[in-house]
Image: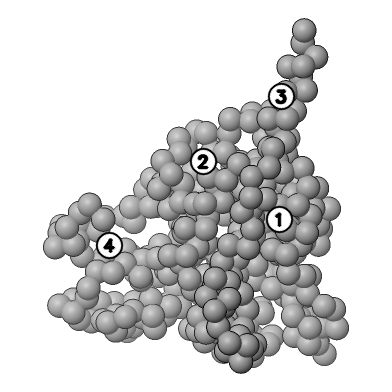
């Protein structure tokens, strides 16, 4: 990846998330979880290694790595 | 901020898509878009064709030239598109039922002709859209709404079927093994001639519930644990391969492509 990972962060589009839990279960660092609406939320941003596996396995395009805002 | 892939390759106004929670189809559709992005294809030079079924909704979401055709006939329409415009990169998205039952004949003949079409089969082992009827890839003894006591048919291995019919590129992957899927779909699109990638999807709503396969995560874990790469399998002792399915690249060979041969015939008669 050309972008330095320092400039990237996980973004979540909650309105597109269907709460299937794939990203949460297969996150290698277990930094994701469900929120009170049953949708994905970032629990531990510090320990996220920005590997992008959540983005790759999300069937709903609801979680992705993008630039910091 | 929007998903980078969605902004470039999808019809934003059609999202969120209507596939069920945990359906593997969205994962495979994203992989196709990533492969197209990686190769750097001009969006206007790509044509995505589908038939009918859950998987066949994909072209509605994808922002290319797209064609949503009749049940099983995606490859027949795609053959027409490719012959009329051989410079187009024609990609067919088809479900297991669409491709191997209703469209079984089109599959074997497209493979036999080695026409330059890339077929991505979204195999969820069931007819999802119409309510969970068993398909030609539903494993023996598994249930569907039309096989409430278990299916007595032997399932098709679509990859082997395509190879038997003469496909010059055939590979199998799963919705869990996304980095491998990206690579195989990219290779399939770059391949000259008929190429097919069978992507094993999951249908938690019908196949999963009917057969008590557990949650979405359980079904993904099954894919993770049950498939081994064909190259890895070669080196494994038989006991480690027991009950496992093979994935990866099964065939990749060069043979004359159909539209090129067709053009040569036309040129030879234009003296």
**Nearer the observer, B149 or B255:** B255
Measured in 3D between alpha carbons, the distance from the residue under mark 2 to the one under mark 1, in whole angstroms, is 18 Å
* Figure check: B76 above or below B269: below
Q: Would you say residue B199 is visible in this rendering?
A: no
Q: Position of residue A51 (x, y in %)?
A: 28, 69
Q: Dot 1: what SS?
A: loop
**Badge 4 element:** strand
Tell me if mark 3 has few (under 14), some (14-19) or many (20+) residues whose alpha carbon lies within 10 angstroms of its own.
few
Q: Earlier in the sequence, mark 3 or mark 1?
A: 1
Marks 2 and 3 share the same chain: yes
Q: Position of residue B89 (x, y in %)?
A: 57, 38
Q: Nearer the viewer, mark 2 or mark 3?
A: 3
Task: Using the rendered view, name the quadrant where residue A9 is placed.
Answer: bottom left
Instruction: State whether discs 3 and 1 lie on one chain.
Output: yes
The residue marked by circle 4 belongs to what chain?
A
* Numbered disc 2: secondary structure: loop
C-alpha separation, residue under disc 4 versus residue under disc 2: 24 Å
Which residue is at 75% across, 52% downward? B166
- Residue B21 is left or right of residue B117, and the answer is left
Chain letter of disc 3 in the image:
B
Task: Identify residue for label 2.
Answer: B64
Task: Work out how far the residue at label 4 is from the one at label 3, CA to CA, in angstroms.
Answer: 45 Å
Mark on residue A65? Answer: 4
Q: Which mark is residue B52?
A: 1
Q: Which residue is mark 3?
A: B263
């Amino acid at each position: 990846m050309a972008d330095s990972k320092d400039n990237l962060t996980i973004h979540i589009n909650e309105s597109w998330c269907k709460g299937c839990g794939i990203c949460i279960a297969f996150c290698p660092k277990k930094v994701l979880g469900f929120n009170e609406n049953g949708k994905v939320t970032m629990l531990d941003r510090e320990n996220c290694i920005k590997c992008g596996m959540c983005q790759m396995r999300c069937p709903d395009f609801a979680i992705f790595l993008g630039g910091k805002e | 901020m929007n998903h980078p892939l969605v902004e470039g390759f999808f019809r934003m106004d059609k999202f969120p898509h209507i596939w069920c929670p945990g359906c593997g189809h969205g994962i495979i559709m994203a992989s196709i878009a990533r492969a197209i992005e990686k190769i750097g294809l001009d969006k206007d030079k790509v044509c995505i064709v589908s038939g009918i079924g859950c998987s066949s909704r994909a072209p509605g979401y994808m922002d290319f030239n797209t064609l949503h055709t009749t049940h099983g006939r995606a490859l027949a329409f795609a053959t027409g598109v490719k012959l009329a415009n051989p410079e187009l990169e024609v990609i067919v998205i088809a479900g297991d039922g669409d491709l191997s039952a209703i469209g079984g004949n089109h599959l074997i003949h497209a493979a036999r002709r080695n026409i330059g079409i890339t077929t991505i089969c979204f195999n969820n082992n069931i007819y999802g859209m119409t309510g969970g009827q068993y398909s030609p890839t539903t494993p023996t003894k598994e249930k569907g709404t039309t096989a409430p006591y278990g299916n007595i048919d032997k399932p098709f291995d679509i990859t082997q079927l395509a190879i038997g019919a003469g496909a010059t590129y055939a590979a199998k992957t799963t919705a869990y093994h996304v980095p491998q899927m990206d690579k195989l779909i990219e290779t399939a699109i770059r391949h000259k001639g008929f190429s097919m990638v069978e992507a094993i999807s999951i249908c938690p709503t019908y196949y999963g519930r009917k057969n008590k396969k557990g949650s979405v995560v359980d079904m993904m874990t099954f894919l993770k644990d049950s498939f081994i790469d064909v190259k890895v399998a070669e080196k494994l002792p038989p006991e480690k391969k027991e009950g496992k399915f093979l994935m990866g690249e099964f065939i990749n060979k060069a043979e004359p492509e159909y539209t090129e041969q067709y053009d040569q015939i036309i040129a030879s008669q234009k003296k």
